Amino acid sequence: MPPTPQQLIDLVQQGIPDAEVQVRLFSGDDHFEMDVCAASFAGKSRVAQHQMVYAALGEQMKAAIHALALKTSIPKEK
């Protein structure tokens, strides 16, 4: 059974505690769009940022999530 958007948010925030996460379904119940903003991404390549998110999602990435459109960013300084 696919996870809910809130379950995905919880997983990412457990793995990346400073993350602000938004998740939307975009097709069916296993296609997601995710925006993750975290200061801990600073100094890391886009690939490394995405790997951090995939690691936080763990087993969900291997089976339950069919498609994930992922955008990562670093908070803008005020």
Image: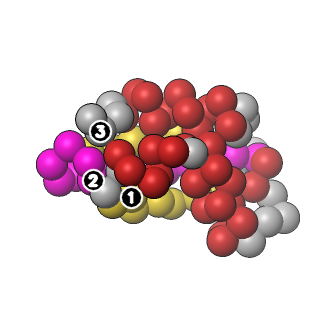
Give the residue type that dot 1 points to.
Leu
Give the residue type that dot 3 points to.
Pro
**Which label belongs to residue 31?**
2
Residue at (65, 61) in percent of width and height: 51
Q: Is residue 3 above or below residue 52?
A: above
Q: Which residue is mark 3?
A: 2
Calculate the distance from the C-alpha at mark 3 to the C-alpha at mark 2.
9 Å
Residue at (46, 36) in percent of width and height: 8
Are circles 1 and 2 on residues that touch, CB within 8 Å? Answer: yes
Q: Residue 11, located in which quarter of the rendered image? A: top right
Residue 61 appears left or right of 33: right
Which circle's residue, 3 or 2, is located before the other in the chain?
Answer: 3
* Residue 14 image point, x, y percent: 65, 30
Q: Which residue is mark 1?
A: 68
Q: Is residue 46 magenta?
A: no
The crowding category of the residue bearing disc 3, from other C-alpha atoms within 10 Å (few below 14, some 14 to 19, many at least 20), is few
Which range is magenta? 26-39
The crowding category of the residue bearing disc 2, from other C-alpha atoms within 10 Å (few below 14, some 14 to 19, many at least 20), is some
Q: Is residue 64 above or below residue 46?
A: above
Give the residue type that dot 2 points to.
His
